Amino acid sequence: MKNRYEFTMDYVRYLDDAGDPLDELPALAADAGRLIDAYRNMVLARTLDQKIIALQRTGKCGTYPSVLGHEVIGTAIGQCMDRHDVFAPYYRDQATQLLRGVPMVNMLLYWGGDERGSAGWELCPQDLPISVPIATQCCHAVGIAAAMRIRDEQRAVVVTLGDGATSKGDFLESVNLAGAWHLPVVFVVANNQWAISTPRGLQTGSETIAQKAISGGLPGHIVDGNDYFAVSEAMEHALDRAHGGKGATVIEAVTYRLGDHTTADDATRYRSADELRSAWDRDGIKRLQSYLHHAGHWDAAREKDLQAHCRDKVEKAVHVYLEKAPEPPAAMVDYLFESLPSSLAGQRERLARKVEGGVS
């Protein structure tokens, strides 16, 4: 006798590229205030993104990974999470971090090479700092989720990553542990089609990213990552599952990386202008804006005011960032250990003396 195992992966989308409903919208669509807040956050994230890239180009910021094309995913995550949940971000989560209360000045400091940008998050102080190493934040997420389960807390961890990160052992091992231990964690994969310069079709043989959840016994869902309603609904269901003690979920949010991998990359070397142009036609911010217009919740005057507000808010944060005095050189060793080892104490003292004496 042969047993046969089969699975299906549904792809959820509510709006077409023009912002028109394809089906009955989920209940959250009735909350006009929530939709407008979501749109405002997306525009703010994109405005900040454009400014940081400009700063990098003029030598006022370090290498930076653009959020362009990920604003819908990040905003939906940020709105759905409870304040007491824990966010374990990767490096393209500016839209979520804005909603989690991370000041724009902190983001600017971090990408400017100042580690003070990773501290002082008053609204959600247990959120993790940005993870640049690929997929390591998944291990941190399941560790935190395990602690929540041991303490019998009705909280959850949301961890984000790109499609390339799902080929790393850190992700696969974390999915396995989350399934085996029934952990309250939500894995959100922003499938933007590119792992730096490696296209989605070459970096994994898996037909979908979401089906990798099956290896850990977890449910996997695929949503249009440019569709605010689809991502929000999937997040709400996954968080309800986690908060209710039913375990983890993997969400694959399909989008497209509209910018370069980072400001150190040139995507024109490995993808065509036609492909990028087609992706812009599916832009999630424009899609939600069109929906709001059609529903009577938005107009040109409000758009003009929003654009001006976002520019002003970003410029004020940039001014504070540029005026921030740098930390002394000795700070490079001050935050590595709880107690400074004797092997570093002498080096720190010599460095401080050189600085005080004006020796370079």
Image (cartoon, helix red, strand yellow):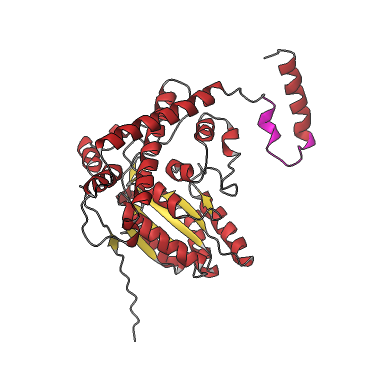
Residue 235: name its quadrant: bottom left
Q: Nearer the viewer, residue 99 or 146?
A: 99
Residue 26, how many percent across, how many down? 31, 61
Would residue 125 be counted in the magenta stretch? no
Q: Residue at the spot x=68%, y=37% of the render?
A: 335
- The overriding secondary structure of the stretch rendered in magenta is loop
Q: Residue at x 39, y 39 (%)?
A: 67
- The quadrant the C terminus occupies is top right
Tell me if I can see residue 247 in this picture: yes
Q: Foreground residue, 27 or 162? A: 27
Determine the residue located farthest toward the bottom in the rendered image: 1
What residue sits 33% from the left and 78% below the top?
4
Q: Over which residues does the magenta segment extend?
A: 329-342
166 and 288: which is toward the camera:
288
Q: Position of residue 247 (x, y in %)?
A: 49, 67
The answer to whether residue 62 is above or below residue 3 is above
Using residue 141 as the reference point, say whether residue 261 is left or right of it. Answer: left
